[in-house]
Image: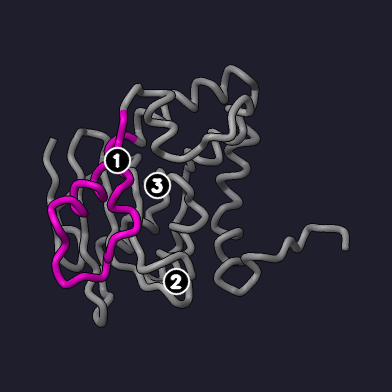
Protein backbone atom coordinates (compact mmCIF):
# COMPACT_ATOMS: atom_id res chain seq x y z
CA UNK A 1 0.00 0.00 0.00
CA UNK A 2 1.26 3.47 -0.90
CA UNK A 3 -0.13 6.86 0.11
CA UNK A 4 0.65 9.79 -2.17
CA UNK A 5 0.27 13.35 -0.85
CA UNK A 6 -0.44 16.13 -3.36
CA UNK A 7 -0.85 19.87 -2.87
CA UNK A 8 -3.76 21.58 -4.57
CA UNK A 9 -4.65 19.03 -7.25
CA UNK A 10 -4.00 15.58 -8.68
CA UNK A 11 -1.03 15.08 -11.03
CA UNK A 12 -1.77 15.64 -14.72
CA UNK A 13 -0.98 12.09 -15.83
CA UNK A 14 -2.77 10.14 -13.07
CA UNK A 15 -5.32 7.56 -14.27
CA UNK A 16 -7.61 6.22 -11.52
CA UNK A 17 -9.78 4.08 -13.77
CA UNK A 18 -13.55 3.95 -14.25
CA UNK A 19 -14.52 3.49 -10.58
CA UNK A 20 -12.74 5.78 -8.11
CA UNK A 21 -13.32 5.92 -4.37
CA UNK A 22 -13.60 9.48 -3.05
CA UNK A 23 -13.88 11.13 0.36
CA UNK A 24 -13.43 14.63 1.74
CA UNK A 25 -12.27 16.23 4.97
CA UNK A 26 -13.62 19.63 5.99
CA UNK A 27 -13.49 21.99 8.96
CA UNK A 28 -16.98 20.85 9.99
CA UNK A 29 -20.33 19.72 8.64
CA UNK A 30 -21.88 23.02 7.50
CA UNK A 31 -21.51 23.41 3.73
CA UNK A 32 -21.39 27.22 3.61
CA UNK A 33 -19.33 27.64 6.77
CA UNK A 34 -16.78 24.84 6.86
CA UNK A 35 -14.24 24.84 4.06
CA UNK A 36 -12.95 21.91 2.06
CA UNK A 37 -9.50 20.90 3.32
CA UNK A 38 -8.65 17.49 1.86
CA UNK A 39 -9.85 15.24 -0.97
CA UNK A 40 -8.70 11.63 -0.93
CA UNK A 41 -9.07 9.10 -3.73
CA UNK A 42 -8.25 5.49 -4.58
CA UNK A 43 -8.55 3.35 -7.70
CA UNK A 44 -9.07 0.28 -5.51
CA UNK A 45 -5.52 -0.92 -6.17
CA UNK A 46 -4.26 -0.48 -2.61
CA UNK A 47 -2.91 3.03 -3.21
CA UNK A 48 -4.45 6.27 -1.98
CA UNK A 49 -3.99 9.83 -3.20
CA UNK A 50 -4.49 12.55 -0.59
CA UNK A 51 -4.91 16.07 -1.98
CA UNK A 52 -4.48 18.96 0.46
CA UNK A 53 -6.61 21.90 -0.70
CA UNK A 54 -5.05 25.38 -0.08
CA UNK A 55 -7.23 27.71 1.97
CA UNK A 56 -7.31 30.71 -0.35
CA UNK A 57 -6.56 29.22 -3.75
CA UNK A 58 -9.04 26.53 -4.75
CA UNK A 59 -8.16 25.75 -8.34
CA UNK A 60 -8.03 22.03 -9.06
CA UNK A 61 -8.76 21.41 -12.75
CA UNK A 62 -7.72 17.75 -12.64
CA UNK A 63 -10.06 17.01 -9.74
CA UNK A 64 -12.87 18.92 -11.45
CA UNK A 65 -12.30 17.01 -14.68
CA UNK A 66 -12.38 13.67 -12.85
CA UNK A 67 -15.53 14.44 -10.88
CA UNK A 68 -17.35 15.72 -13.97
CA UNK A 69 -16.33 12.84 -16.24
CA UNK A 70 -19.49 10.95 -17.18
CA UNK A 71 -17.75 7.60 -17.69
CA UNK A 72 -16.01 7.62 -14.32
CA UNK A 73 -18.18 6.47 -11.42
CA UNK A 74 -17.36 8.17 -8.13
CA UNK A 75 -17.74 5.84 -5.13
CA UNK A 76 -18.50 7.52 -1.80
CA UNK A 77 -19.55 6.67 1.72
CA UNK A 78 -22.21 9.25 2.65
CA UNK A 79 -22.14 10.78 -0.83
CA UNK A 80 -24.77 13.40 -0.01
CA UNK A 81 -22.31 15.47 2.05
CA UNK A 82 -19.22 14.90 -0.11
CA UNK A 83 -21.04 15.80 -3.34
CA UNK A 84 -22.35 18.97 -1.72
CA UNK A 85 -18.87 19.99 -0.57
CA UNK A 86 -17.23 19.25 -3.92
CA UNK A 87 -19.99 21.03 -5.84
CA UNK A 88 -19.88 24.07 -3.58
CA UNK A 89 -16.10 24.51 -3.36
CA UNK A 90 -14.86 23.14 -6.69
CA UNK A 91 -17.91 24.19 -8.76
CA UNK A 92 -18.15 20.80 -10.45
CA UNK A 93 -20.99 18.48 -11.37
CA UNK A 94 -20.17 15.26 -9.52
CA UNK A 95 -21.81 12.33 -11.27
CA UNK A 96 -22.36 9.42 -11.82
CA UNK A 97 -22.00 8.24 -8.23
CA UNK A 98 -22.43 5.24 -5.92
CA UNK A 99 -22.85 5.46 -2.15
CA UNK A 100 -21.98 2.60 0.19
CA UNK A 101 -23.92 4.14 3.09
CA UNK A 102 -27.16 4.25 1.08
CA UNK A 103 -26.52 0.76 -0.27
CA UNK A 104 -26.02 -0.52 3.27
CA UNK A 105 -29.18 1.15 4.54
CA UNK A 106 -31.22 -0.30 1.70
CA UNK A 107 -30.04 -3.89 2.02
CA UNK A 108 -28.71 -4.31 5.59
CA UNK A 109 -32.04 -3.58 7.31
CA UNK A 110 -31.18 -6.07 10.05
CA UNK A 111 -28.86 -3.49 11.66
CA UNK A 112 -28.65 0.22 12.35
CA UNK A 113 -24.85 0.26 12.00
CA UNK A 114 -23.98 1.73 8.61
CA UNK A 115 -20.82 3.75 9.33
CA UNK A 116 -17.65 3.04 7.39
CA UNK A 117 -16.00 1.48 10.43
CA UNK A 118 -19.06 -0.76 10.86
CA UNK A 119 -19.01 -1.86 7.21
CA UNK A 120 -15.28 -2.59 7.28
CA UNK A 121 -15.79 -4.83 10.32
CA UNK A 122 -19.00 -6.56 9.17
CA UNK A 123 -18.15 -7.09 5.50
CA UNK A 124 -14.33 -7.24 5.42
CA UNK A 125 -13.46 -8.22 9.00
CA UNK A 126 -11.21 -5.16 9.26
CA UNK A 127 -10.86 -2.77 12.19
CA UNK A 128 -10.12 0.79 11.12
CA UNK A 129 -9.48 3.73 13.42
CA UNK A 130 -11.67 6.85 13.29
CA UNK A 131 -9.55 8.69 15.87
CA UNK A 132 -8.45 11.47 13.50
CA UNK A 133 -11.97 12.18 12.21
CA UNK A 134 -12.39 15.28 14.38
CA UNK A 135 -8.84 16.60 14.08
CA UNK A 136 -7.85 19.98 12.58
CA UNK A 137 -7.91 19.33 8.84
CA UNK A 138 -7.17 22.98 8.10
CA UNK A 139 -3.70 22.82 9.67
CA UNK A 140 -0.83 24.10 7.54
CA UNK A 141 0.69 20.60 7.51
CA UNK A 142 -1.12 17.30 7.89
CA UNK A 143 0.24 14.83 10.42
CA UNK A 144 1.22 11.29 9.47
CA UNK A 145 -1.81 10.05 11.44
CA UNK A 146 -4.15 12.37 9.52
CA UNK A 147 -2.78 11.27 6.15
CA UNK A 148 -3.13 7.59 7.06
CA UNK A 149 -6.65 8.18 8.35
CA UNK A 150 -7.66 10.01 5.16
CA UNK A 151 -6.30 7.12 3.09
CA UNK A 152 -8.19 4.52 5.13
CA UNK A 153 -11.48 6.23 4.23
CA UNK A 154 -11.07 5.28 0.56
CA UNK A 155 -8.84 2.21 0.49
CA UNK A 156 -11.62 -0.26 1.30
CA UNK A 157 -14.63 1.25 -0.50
CA UNK A 158 -14.24 -0.87 -3.64
CA UNK A 159 -14.28 -4.12 -1.64
CA UNK A 160 -17.24 -2.92 0.46
CA UNK A 161 -19.14 -1.93 -2.68
CA UNK A 162 -18.63 -5.37 -4.23
CA UNK A 163 -20.11 -7.03 -1.15
CA UNK A 164 -23.07 -4.64 -1.01
CA UNK A 165 -23.70 -4.89 -4.73
CA UNK A 166 -23.99 -8.67 -4.44
CA UNK A 167 -26.54 -8.23 -1.65
CA UNK A 168 -28.53 -5.60 -3.57
CA UNK A 169 -28.73 -7.85 -6.62
CA UNK A 170 -29.66 -10.87 -4.49
CA UNK A 171 -32.51 -8.96 -2.80
CA UNK A 172 -33.79 -7.37 -6.01
CA UNK A 173 -32.89 -3.85 -4.86
CA UNK A 174 -30.24 -2.85 -7.39
CA UNK A 175 -32.58 -0.78 -9.57
CA UNK A 176 -33.90 1.12 -6.53
CA UNK A 177 -30.34 1.71 -5.31
CA UNK A 178 -29.28 3.03 -8.72
CA UNK A 179 -32.25 5.40 -8.88
CA UNK A 180 -31.33 6.69 -5.42
CA UNK A 181 -27.70 7.20 -6.44
CA UNK A 182 -28.85 9.12 -9.53
CA UNK A 183 -30.87 11.46 -7.29
CA UNK A 184 -27.96 12.27 -4.96
CA UNK A 185 -26.63 15.31 -6.88
CA UNK A 186 -30.14 16.83 -6.64
CA UNK A 187 -30.31 16.04 -2.92
CA UNK A 188 -26.94 17.76 -2.46
CA UNK A 189 -28.14 20.76 -4.51
CA UNK A 190 -31.09 21.10 -2.12
CA UNK A 191 -28.63 21.11 0.79
CA UNK A 192 -26.52 23.80 -0.86
CA UNK A 193 -29.63 25.93 -1.37
CA UNK A 194 -30.65 25.79 2.28
CA UNK A 195 -33.05 22.84 2.34
CA UNK A 196 -30.81 20.45 4.26
CA UNK A 197 -33.20 20.25 7.22
CA UNK A 198 -36.48 20.54 5.31
CA UNK A 199 -38.32 17.55 3.85
CA UNK A 200 -39.88 19.20 0.82
CA UNK A 201 -41.67 15.93 0.03
CA UNK A 202 -43.51 15.83 3.35
CA UNK A 203 -47.30 16.34 3.42
CA UNK A 204 -47.47 19.33 5.75
Tell me how far mark 2 sits from mark 3, CA to CA: 17 Å
Does residue 1 sit above or below 133 in this rendering?
above
Residue name at image x 75 percent, y 63 percent? 200
Q: How many marks?
A: 3
Tell me how far mark 1 sits from mark 3, CA to CA: 23 Å
Dot 1 alpha-carbon crowd within 10 angstroms: few under 14, some 14 to 19, many 20 or more: few
- 61 displayed left or right of 141: right
Residue name at image x 34 percent, y 68 percent? 36
Please name which of the two marks, 1 or 3, marks the residue nearer to the observer. 1
User: Percent x, y for residue 53?
Assistant: 24, 68
User: Percent x, y for residue 85?
Assistant: 43, 65
- 176 displayed left or right of 81: right
- Numbered disc 3: secondary structure: strand
Report the magenta stretch's main SS.
loop
The C terminus - image quarter: bottom right
Does residue 125 sit above or below 100 in this rendering?
above
Q: Which residue is mark 1?
A: 129
Q: Which residue is mark 3?
A: 74
Q: Which residue is mark 2?
A: 88
Amino acid sequence: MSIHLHLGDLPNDLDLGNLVAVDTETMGLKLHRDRLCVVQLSAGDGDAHVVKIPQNNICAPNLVRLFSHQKTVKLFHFARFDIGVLTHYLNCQCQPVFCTKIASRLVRTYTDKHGLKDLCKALLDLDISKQQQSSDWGASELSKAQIEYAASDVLYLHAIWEKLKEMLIREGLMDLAQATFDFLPIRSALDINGFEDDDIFAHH
